[in-house]
Every structure is written in C-alpha cells, then in structure tokens.
Image: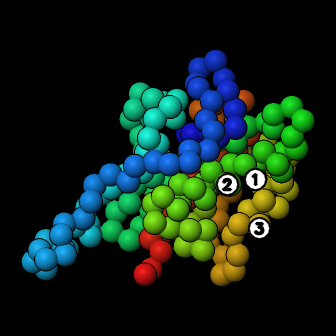
Amino acid sequence: MTRPNERTPAMPAFKPFLAAALLGAPLASAAPALADDHAASEKRTVMPEGGPGLAMMEEYGFSEAVIHGDTVYLSGVILGPPPEGMTREQAYDRSFQYLGSVLERAGSSWDDVVDITTYHVDIDASMPALAAVKNRYVKAPFPAWTAIDIDRLFAPEGEVEIKITARVTPR
C-alpha cells in the first residue's frame, strides 16, 4: 500500500524513509521467564518518523511493518510506472532499496525473507524487470514467491504490489 516512487492526486509521494521509530520495547531482561515469553510475543510496529508517509499510514491505519515474535510482516508496497527518464528496472530497484530499509529497521534483512507475494496488473510486462531486480537482492536459498495477476491495485496507476514476510535476523 505504500509506494516509494510516485505521486497521485489521491495520495502523497512516498520516498524511501531513512529513519523510522521501532515502537514497543520488550520487557527488561531481569523480568521473570513468563514476562520474557510475553515480550517475545508482543506486537511491535515500524513507522516513518514523519512526513507524508506517516500521515498516510495514520489516515488509513496501517504500519510499514509489524514484528510479532521472530516474524516481520511488511505492508504491501506499490510500484508504479517509472518516472520520466527512468527505466522500469531502475524504478523497481528504488522500491527494493526502500523495502530493504524497512527490513533493516525491523531487525531483518533480505537474507531473512521467507515469503514474497507480488500482485501484478500486467504480469507479462512487469515480471522481467521485477525478477531482475529481485534477483539482485534475494539470494539462495530462495524464499517462497507467489505472483498473482490482478485487475488493479489501490493506486490506480500501480503496476505491482510487493508484500514480504521475513524472520528477525538471528543474533
């Protein structure tokens, strides 16, 4: 539902958010084992610190990512047509950089991705560039990936929406 590289009349532009607050701290390590178990299952969220991204997420009521236990759930990110002077692959790469920053702020990385779901308005047109970019970020062992062709996305000019599930990077 967020998009790092476009502007539409209905929604503000989304640029990569360089910093976001990780809300909800776990209980202190000196707490009893039961409290530690509760802290591990607490839901925490990743949100931008400000700007149009935060305003839009608050308006629609969603987070960039939710961390529950050792799993990170990223909200869908919509990729649209490339801005003038940029190829589809370059635009998609910018979106993957943004996704990587959300993973990092959630305590994860591309190496920890376990599932990718992509929704395509025109799967034949978007898949070659998307696969090329994804393969620069996602290495073997590969996560599960489901690609679905659909009629449209929340943003009318959107081409692809990417939703990611990852694990928190083991320490």
Residue 97's disc number: 2
Q: Residue at x 32, y 51 (%)?
A: 23
| Pointer 3 residue | 135
Looking at the image, which residue is at 40% across and 32% down? Answer: 58
Residue situated in front as seen by the camera: 149 or 78: 78
Is residue 8 in sight in this rendering?
A: yes
Q: Is residue 161 left or right of residue 48?
A: right
Say above or below: 165 vs 86: below
Residue to which mark 1 is pinned: 93
Badge 2: few (under 14), some or many (20 or more) residues near its Cα, within 10 Å?
some
- From the viewer's side, name the closer residue of 62 and 94: 94
* Residue toward you, 13 or 123: 13
51 horizontally vs 36: left or right: right
Separation (CA) of disc 2 from disc 3: 13 Å
- Mark 3 vs mark 1, CA separation in Å: 11 Å
Residue 43 in picture, x, y percent from top left: 30, 57
Q: Position of residue 91 (x, y in %)?
A: 78, 45
Could you tell me the amino acid type at mark 2?
A: Gln
Q: Residue at x 33, y 56 (%)?
A: 44
Find the distance from the CA under tag 2 to the CA under tag 1. 6 Å
Q: Disc 3 marks which amino acid?
A: Asn
Indicate the position of residue 125 as horizontal and vertical percent values. 85, 46
Which label sits in the foreground, 3 or 1?
1
Of labels 3 and 1, earlier in sequence is 1
